Amino acid sequence: MSKVLVISGHPNLDSSYTNKVILKQAENNVHDIQVRRLDTLYPDFRIDVEAEQQALLEADVVVLQFPFYWYSIPALLKKWIDDVFSYNFACGSKGDKLKGKDFLLSFTIGGPSESYDPLGYNHFSIEQLLMPLQQTAYLAGMNFQKPLYSHGMVFIPGVYNTQEGVEAKALEHSNMLVSRINALVDSTENRVKKLVKAWFEKFDVLPETGDYFVESLSKDVTWIAPEGEFKGHAGFNDWYQTVRGVFKPDCQHIVENVQVFENEGDIKAELRIRLIADTFSGESINLLVNEKWDLVDVDSKLVITRYLVEPVQG
């Protein structure tokens, strides 16, 4: 899975003195990254929506990298958003496919910072001009991160800046971008969400043994479910075999919400999960539950120490 997806919105990246440097550094210094150049993929503006949506589904962190054009984004990137952030994908009653993903804007600005001020010739702050993109992220349920941008990033030979100067600024920008991305990827929240995603994807299959799950459980884990309270790996395995005797494989766990809290090494996650499954007795189940996980970090691996499942009444 591509953990980090970068969408390059420059209309002609090969001609760029800054965005080209930034993207190269990101590709060389961020693990598990995919950069999609819209200018080479879609010079005719005909976006392959299915391919772009699939790339988004596989990402945890989404970065838009672009030059700031007329107080907004380049036309090709706007077309990409218009086509790809579609109804029932990014918004609408079923449009939760991007929910919980981190959304970071990284861009270059030609003008000086003082011009983006009520007394400057651009009048408005960068943050004010970004509000439509910020709202786009909110509507899609994404985590809007503080934007990263750099001023004075245009080179006009003999008129404004030098090539060496803007390339040096681009390198500084790229270093900040790499740090921001790596911090997001390595955050406790993202690590927990990754575990949750993999956990329930495996539970959908209901493998013959619970060995996969045991790897993420502490030896003295407390497991509390409607079927009772169980202790340790042996207790979990007893519960798991009971559940396998009730539910058919190929069920569906829909993760509707995940909240992560961290305090002095203690990690807690609160989840809302919907189970859609068939039983061996012929019953179809559509069950909504709240789950609470207590976790600890052991040698950079998240381990669950307490697991509570509570059906939502009504």
Image (tube, helix red, strand yellow):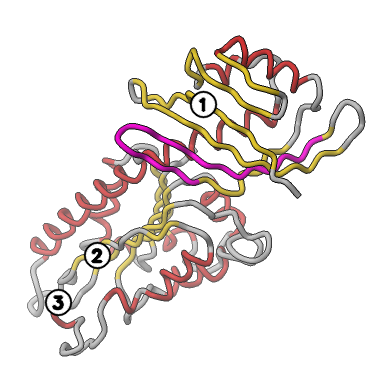
In the depicted structure, whether residue 79 falls above or below residue 250: below
**Residue 112 circle label:** 3
Please tell me whether mark 2 sits on a helix, a strand or a loop: strand
What amino acid type is highlighted by mark number 2? Answer: Tyr
What amino acid type is highlighted by mark number 1? Answer: Arg
What amino acid type is highlighted by mark number 3? Answer: Pro
Circles 3 and 2 in contact, beta carbons < 8 Å = no
The answer for how far apart the CA atoms under marks 3 and 1 are is 53 Å
Category of crowding for the residue at label 1, using alpha-carbon neighbours closer than 10 angstroms: few (below 14), some (14–19), many (at least 20): some
Please tell me whether mark 3 sits on a helix, a strand or a loop: loop
Q: Quadrant of residue 288?
A: top right
Q: Is residue 50 left or right of residue 119?
A: right
Q: Quadrant of residue 106?
A: bottom left
In the image, 98 versus 10, the foreground residue is: 98
The answer for how far apart the CA atoms under marks 1 and 2 are is 42 Å
Chain part drawn in magenta: 259-277
Circles 1 and 2 in contact, beta carbons < 8 Å = no
Q: Residue at x 20, y 81 (%)?
A: 116
Q: Which badge, 1 or 2, comes first in the chain's sequence?
A: 2
Q: Is residue 264 magenta?
A: yes
Q: Residue at x 20, y 74 (%)?
A: 110
In the image, 68 versus 271, the foreground residue is: 271
- Badge 1 is on which residue? 306
Image x and y of residue 103, in percent: 41, 57
Image x and y of residue 37, in percent: 41, 57
Category of crowding for the residue at label 3, using alpha-carbon neighbours closer than 10 angstroms: few (below 14), some (14–19), many (at least 20): few
